[in-house]
Image (spheres, rainbow, N blue to C red):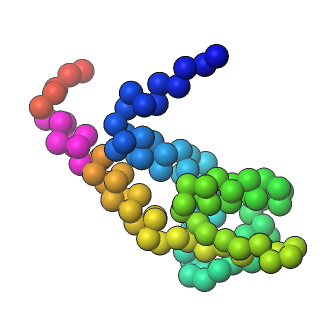
Amino acid sequence: MAYNKKEHFTEFEQQASDFARALAHPARISILVKLAEENKCVCGAIVDDMPLAQSTVSQHLKELKSAGLVQGEIEGAKSCYCINWDNLEKEIKIFEEFIEKLKAKKFANQCC
């Protein structure tokens, strides 16, 4: 049985990693941009604007929703999605903190 070593990392490291994983595909970035441009719940139009099959777009939306970056409702055959701004802003702050921690070490450790 596989041993999960994730618990050996800090909660902060896990949160930053989860956020990066949620954004780790250009389709997900594109979906977030489209949702931000509309600034409302979008139903169906996401699939029309993407060069991907409906099922593929749905999988990417599922990943974004699972990460808490989008929220959505399914009403019969149509699904509507919008950005969960509170969660997105929280995740951005965590990632900014991660970047600042890296930058703080930039001059302390000169190699290569």
Location of residue 36 by image quarter = bottom right
Q: Height in image: 39 above or below 74?
A: below
The picture places residue 71, in percent across and down from the top left corner, at 61, 69
| Place of residue 37 in the rendered image (x, y in percent of width and height, measured from the top left) | 57, 78
In magenta stretch: residue 103: yes
In the figure, is residue 64 to the left or right of 54?
A: left
- Which corner quadrant of the image does residue 1 belong to? top right
Give 110 or 91, whichever is nearer the viewer. 91
Query: Percent from the top left, x then y, of residue 78?
Result: 82, 75
> What is the number of callouts on the image?
0
Q: Look at 34% across and 37% down and name the residue there.
A: 10
**Residue drawn at point x = 42 percent, y = 41 percent:** 14
Would residue 8 be counted in the magenta stretch? no
- Residue 105: image quadrant is top left
Visible in this render: residue 27?
no
Quarter that holds the C terminus: top left
- Identify the main secondary structure in magenta: helix
Tell which of 80 and 26 is nearer to you.
80
Can residue 32 be seen in this snapshot?
yes
Magenta range is 100-107
- Give the residue at the far left of this rendering: 108
